[in-house]
Amino acid sequence: MSQLLDLAVDLQDRRERLTHRATAKSLRIWGQADVGALDASWDRIAPTLTTVVTAAQVTAARQSTPYMNSVSQAWDYDAHRAVLVPEAFGGVMLDGREVAPALFGAVTTTKRAIGAGMNPARAFEVGATFLATIIGAAVQDMGRQADATLATGKGFTRYVRVVSAGACSRCAILAGRDDYRKPFSRHPRCRCTSVPIPNGQGPPDGFHDTPTEYFDSLSAAEQERVFTKSGAFAIREGANPISVVNARRGMTKGGELGAPARLVPTRIGVKADGSPLNVFITGEGTTARGAFARSEGAATFTAAKQGRYRRTTTLRIMPEQIQIMAGNNPARARELLARYGYMDF
Ligand SMILES: [Zn+2]
C-alpha cells in the first residue's frame, strides 16, 4: 500500500465515522419529536439538530488540513501557502441553502407520508431516513468542499477519485482522474473523496486510472454486488463498465447555480482567532439539477410556504461555484476563495 493510499483511506474512514456519529446523535434528537405534534416538536429540536450538523461540518472541514499537508509532503510537492477557514463550511448545504430548512424536509416528508395514508409510526421512520440522508450529504459535501478549497489553495488542480469501499456502480464508473475546477459528481450517501495529484502525475500506487482498473481490483463477489451478476459478466467479457451502468442516474452536482447577480457579505460568526467570519450570500434562485436536488428543493419550498423558513431564498456562494466564477484560472480561484471567506493565504 502506498503512503498516499493510506492517507486517503484514513481521511475517508475518519469522515465516515464523523458522519455516522452526527447522524446517530441527530436521530436520537429526532426520536424526541412527537409525531402527533410535529411542528411544535420541530421548533423545540431544530436548534440542537442544526448545531449538531453544523459542528460536524466544521469538523469535516478541519480534517482537510492535516490530510492535505500530509498529501503534499508525500508527493514532495512545493505547495502554495493556504490556510483553511473551517468555520466557513458550517451551517450550509452544497446548493448554498442553510442547513435548518434542509433538515425540516424530515417534517414535510413525514407529513406527506401520513397524508398518503401511512401509519404515523412508520411515516416517522421515513422522516428519519430522509434526515439521515440529508445529514450525510451535509457533512460529506462540506468535507469535500473543504478538501477542494485547500487543494486549490495549495496549487493543485487535479485529483484522483478515492472511490469509497462499498461504493455503488455510479461511483465505480467515475474511478480515475478528475479536476477540482469542476463540481464533484456525487449522489445521496456518496462517501467518495479525492487525493490531489501534481500536474503531469498519474494516479499514485493503489489507485485506479479507469473504471475497468477499478473493476479488476474488486473481488468477484464485489464485482457482482456493484455491477450485478450480468453486468459483471459483461465487463469480464470486455464491456466497458460505463456502458453497463445506467450512467449518471441520480447523480447530482452542486455548483450549478450560475453566476449570482449580487453577493452580500453576511457575518455568520467568528473564526477561531476571534475575527469576524463573513460569508457571501445571494438572493438569486437556485437551478441545482437532478432528482436529489429536486427532492431537497421541494421540501424547502414547502417549508417556505408554511412560513417557517422565509429566508431560504438566500443562498451562500459555495467553493464549487467560485471555481466556475474563476473561469478556469487557478490563481483567480485562490484569490476568490480567500475573498469569500473559505481560506486565507
Ligand atoms: Zn461515491
Image: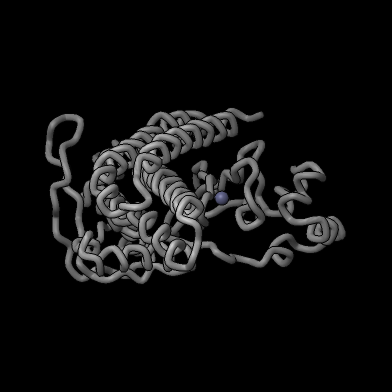
Q: Is residue 151 visible?
A: no
Between 83 and 306, the residue placed more toward the observer is 306
Between 198 and 343, the residue placed more toward the observer is 343
Above or below, 62 relative to 332: above
Q: Is residue 253 visible?
A: yes
Which residue in the rendered view is the most extreme toward the right? Answer: 237
Q: Residue at left 20%, top 67%?
A: 283
* Left or right of residue 251: residue 282: left
* Left or right of residue 132: residue 237: right
Q: Residue at left 57%, top 52%?
A: 177
Above or below, 143 relative to 289: above
The x and y percentages for residue 340 are 22, 51
Q: Residue at left 73%, top 54%?
A: 212
The x and y percentages for residue 191 are 53, 45
- Visual colour scheme: one colour
Total tally of numbered discs in the picture: 0
* Left or right of residue 193: residue 55: left
On-image quarter of the N terminus: top right
The x and y percentages for residue 345 are 25, 39
Between 249 and 331, the residue placed more toward the observer is 249
Above or below, 196 relative to 119: above
Q: Residue at left 59%, top 66%?
A: 249
Above or below, 47 relative to 310: above
The image quadrant that residue 255 belongs to is bottom left
